[in-house]
Image (cartoon, helix red, strand yellow):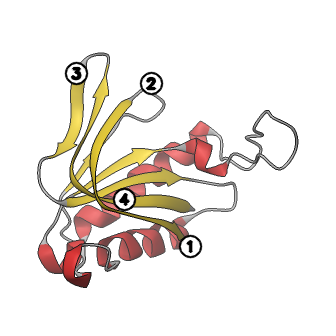
Amino acid sequence: MRAIATRVTRASVTVEGEVVGKIDEPGLLVLLGVTHSDGREEVVKMARKLHEIRALRDEESCATTGAPLLVVSQFTLYGSTKKGRRPSWTEAARPEQAEPLVDEVVAELRERGARVSTGVFGAMMAVESVNDGPFTLLVEV
């Protein structure tokens, strides 16, 4: 499981002209990808890491500040560009495996007390964000 976590001052996800998820204050925009070998162990580790990672200003985390997270599924994080010009998606988990795991990460974050908004799995989404810094991390478990 891997994620791109970006510190933002605000972010939103729009599907078919409707805002489906947003954060209107400093927090993290998280693009989350799942691979074939991911399971419950990776879910718990990723949720903990995203909640506790010291990526906010003054080396704070969402856990210490109560800052929100906007989690968006992103299978393309497992795209490979090693050969040719066309990305390969063979390392990305199939939707029937990935969607429940993305949902579990969101549920685990909420269980930890995090405020979480989401996109819509599998939808064509317009993601807008105002990056703070910019400060972006690749998070892998």
- Most extreme residue toward the front is 133
Q: Secondary structure at mark 3?
A: strand
On the image, the x and y values in percent for residue 103 come to: 40, 50
Mark 3 or mark 4: which is in front? 4
- Name the residue carrying label 3: 18
On the image, the x and y values in percent for residue 96 come to: 58, 39
Amino acid type of the residue tagged 3 in the rendering: Glu
Mark 2 or mark 4: which is in front? 4
Residue at image position (49%, 59%) is 3
Q: Residues within 10 Å of mark 4 (few under 14, many from 20)?
A: many
Residue at image position (20%, 42%) is 22
Chain-order first, disc 2 or disc 3: 3
- Name the residue carrying label 1: 141
Chain-order first, disc 1 or disc 3: 3
Q: Is residue 74 left or right of residue 6?
A: right
In the image, 129 versus 33, the foreground residue is 129
- Name the residue carrying label 2: 124
Chain-order first, disc 4 or disc 1: 4
Q: Secondary structure at mark 2?
A: loop
Q: Secondary structure at mark 4?
A: strand
C-beta proximity under 8 Å, tags 2 and 3: no
Indicate whether 106 appears above or below 139.
Answer: above
Q: CA distance from mark 3 to mark 4?
A: 23 Å
Chain-order first, disc 1 or disc 2: 2
Q: Is residue 127 left or right of residue 60?
A: right
Quadrant into which the N terminus falls = bottom right
Amino acid type of the residue tagged 1 in the rendering: Val
